[in-house]
Amino acid sequence: MTSGADGMLYLLKAEPTLLPEAPADTTVAQMEHRRVDEVHACLRCGERARNAYVADTKLGYRWLDLCHACAHWLRTTMTDRPH
Ligand SMILES: [Zn+2]
């Protein structure tokens, strides 16, 4: 879940310094808890985030909160990009 962090941050225009710190050993249960039980704004559009990812940034691990639409956009955008 931590691959392509730089590309994700670039696509989202997200500053790692502004993202909340995530534990280095984030478990699936923690990700589920953040996604389901907590309310966070989508990084890209501000809607309620329904997906939580952990990005391995140069500053350490950071949470990425995204709504369904933006998570889908990110997945498809990253997949479509030539490597
Ligand atoms: Zn969104």
Image: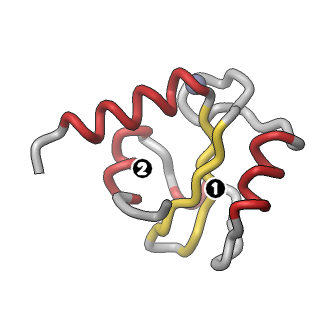
What residue do we see at 48% from left, 68% from top?
Answer: 56
Q: Position of residue 35 (x, y in %)?
A: 75, 43
Name, please, the residue furthest toward the left. 82
For label 2, the crowd category at 10 Å Cα-Cα, with few meaning under 14, some 14 to 19 and many 20 or more, is: some
Which is nearer the N-term, disc 2 or disc 1?
Answer: 2
**19 displayed left or right of 6:** right
For residue 9, which numbered disc appears in the image? 2
Q: How is the image coloured?
A: secondary structure
- Label 1 residue SS: strand
Q: Position of residue 53 (x, y in %)?
A: 58, 52
On screen, residue 47 above or below 53: above
Identify residue type, mark 2.
Leu
Q: Position of residue 13 (x, y in %)?
A: 42, 40
Q: Of 16 and 82, which appears nearest the observer?
A: 82
Name, please, the residue furthest toward the right. 37
Q: Residue 67 sits in which quadrant? A: top right
Q: Are marks 2 and 1 in contact (CB under 8 Å)?
A: no
Ligand 1, seen in the image, is in the quarter at top right
Identify residue type, mark 1.
Trp
- Label 2 residue SS: helix
Q: Which residue is mark 1?
A: 63
Q: Is label 2's Cβ within 8 Å of ligand 1?
A: no
What distance separates the C-alpha of mark 2 from that of mark 1?
11 Å
Q: Position of residue 17 (x, y in %)?
A: 58, 60
Name, please, the residue furthest toward the front. 28
What residue do we see at 69% from left, 33% from top?
Answer: 50
Q: Residue 3 sits in which quadrant? A: bottom left
For residue 18, which numbered disc appears in the image? none
